[in-house]
Image (spheres, rainbow, N blue to C red):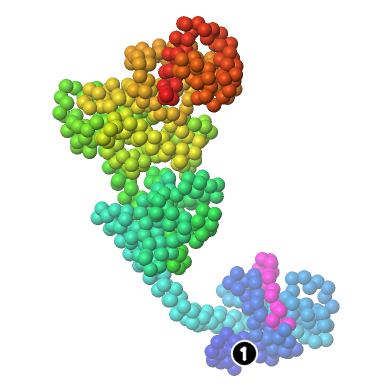
Amino acid sequence: MSAFLRALNEAENLEATQFTILRAALEVAPAAQAAILLADDSGMRLTPGLSIGFQPAIAGASDWRLEPSQTLNFTEGRHLVLRADTENWDGMPALVGFWLSRGRSVTVSPICHAGRLVALLVRTVENRVPSDPSKNPTLLSLLEHSAIAMEKALALENFRRRREELPAVLDVVDEQRLVLERTLSINDEFTRMVLDGQGIGAVVATLGRIVDNPVVIVDRFFNLLEHYSTEDRDGLDNGHRFIITNGSCPSAVRYDPEVQAVMASLAKKRRPSRLMPLPRHGFDKPRVVAPIVVDQEIIGLISVLEGNHPLDVLDLVAVERAATAIALRLMKEQAAVEAKYKLKGDLIEALLTGSYGSDEEIILKRAAYLGIDLHVPHAVLVVGVEGSALSTRKETSEHEPLSPHAKVLAVLERACRRKLPEAVVTAKDDEIIILASFRPAAGTDGLFETRKIADSLHVEVPQWLPGITISLGIGGPCNILADYLQSYEQARCALDVIKASRLRGRILAFDQLGINGLLFDLHNRDKALRFMEDTVGGLLAYDERHHTQLAESVHRYLLHDRNIERAAQVLFVHPNTLRYRLQRAATILKTDLESSEAICNLHWATKVLYGLHSD
């Protein structure tokens, strides 16, 4: 035993320790073969260790998963003695079953230390009944010393393995440290830019330099805010090049189902996402898109094209930090805009209600402070929002939280910033009001210039908001402060005429009503609208239900002095068709078109109704 202990003490590694134990085991308890199965930390899974006498293929196939009860038996020091004629081999390792099937008897002895199973010693005896290992004191002593030596050898083996792995671990730690340092540096850089008051352009340029790829920033309407790209390595695809050239992307892109799905996903994740190309819209290069979120609302997108090289982990960190920096900057700008917007709203409220008092100089100074020059002519436009989208899209989604009314306001504000930078757009109750300045060109009047402004805005909304249209009522020119209240009332009156006519999506200036505007005396507007409704309302309702043009046919007939041929020519119909329409209209209205009173009432009502179509 002393020689055995010296050999265990001199063993330099796990393999030498196992060999010493096996050789000693074969001496103190003669056997044909011996092998060691190593237990994991749980003591429930065994893997092949060293063996003597076993075929390597058989020993290598050993993989024994113990049940908790089996592990408990071994840790309590119990041995297994399996005779060659045993019939129950369930749960035995492959090598045990192999030797039992060939007429060998097998003993399995636990090597335990401090109540933990370290290994199993497996021995075979050929053509004889094995002795009980638990009655061999020398073997038991050997197993006890072996457990201590095995525990020590395993610990040494683990230490050596970890020491060999240490350089790789240190490399990983060093790499992670560099990533952390770079992440902190990126975060500090963008934070400093925000604190220093630098604009979105500086943030985008910094991001572009970090990721070395083109960067495009758009708002919620896909209008360009800023972009960054290098001259020598453009890296842009046609879709983003279109946005940069035109300042926005086509509405077909915004309302593409696949784009809508992407927006919904971004709204849910709120983190940068790598998107697949969208070649049908010209976005044929891979890109990473990050949402710019303010108050739980996506107000813009950062698109980084992987035109020069794919983005790595640090690049994605930079994109996310840039999105946060831009969001902070936009929040600051939004707060300033909202404050100025409120001041402008209060000013417009005072102008349109005449509540500014007798000191006109104060209101002029307030306006000048807000960038509004009331010394130049203005016109008041009142906007009505209409369309199928108002009824079909009442509920707002997470990625598109604005109501249709608010979307129209945002589109009009953007359009005025681009086309009419001096215009003021504000909301008053459920109305959208535009105060537009104009300087009439030679040979034109204020109405002409204001109509051009209204036409431009009228086209803008459906381009960006399919399913929504607007009508605009235009008041008279404002040359002095007292004119603004009158112009506002006139604009509202013109919009009421459009609504009463059931002709949506139109533009009407109060001046176009001519003498018919007397019907809409500002104090009797409700009576005038009721007069129009009582006179031609039934005809308008019939036209709306049956998609006919009876009301317009009556209007053209009366407008052309009851000349059938001239009116039919204007309507592009045969005179007999017009005669039929007039007869049908008379039947619906239950009136006689030869009656002077009926003709007078219809003439006034239809001239007001179709004042915006006067020849």
Q: Residue 112 appears at what percent x and percent y?
A: 61, 76
Sort mark 1 into few (<14), some (14-19) or many (20+) by Cα contacts within 10 Å: some
Q: Is residue 184 visible?
A: no
Q: Bounds of the magenta span?
A: 58-77
Q: Residue 384 appears at what percent x and percent y?
A: 41, 28
Q: Which residue, as the protein is rendered here, is positioned at the far bottom?
A: 3
Horizontal side of 49 relative to 183 (left or right) equals right
* Residue at (43% x, 76% y) in the render: 171
As for residue 509 lying within the magenta part, the answer is no
Q: Is residue 358 visible?
A: yes
As for residue 66 lying within the magenta part, the answer is yes
* Residue at (24% x, 31% y) in the render: 377
User: Is residue 71 or residue 213 the one in the foreground?
Assistant: 213
Q: In which image quadrant can residue 424 be found?
A: top left
Quadrant position of the C terminus in the picture: top left
Vertical comparison of 467 with 219: above or below: above
* Residue at (46% x, 33% y) in the render: 469
The type of residue carrying mark 1 is: Thr
Q: In which image quadrant can residue 117 be found?
A: bottom right
User: Is residue 454 or residue 58 the one in the foreground?
Assistant: 454
Q: Residue 324 appears at what percent x and percent y?
A: 37, 53
Vertical comparison of 284 with 3: above or below: above
Residue that carries the numbered disc 1 in the rendered image: 20
Horizontal side of 572 relative to 448 (left or right) equals right
Q: Which residue, as the protein is rendered here, is positioned at the far front?
A: 565
Q: Secondary structure at mark 1?
A: helix
Q: Residue 442 appears at what percent x and percent y?
A: 26, 35
Q: In which image quadrant can residue 178 be found?
A: bottom left
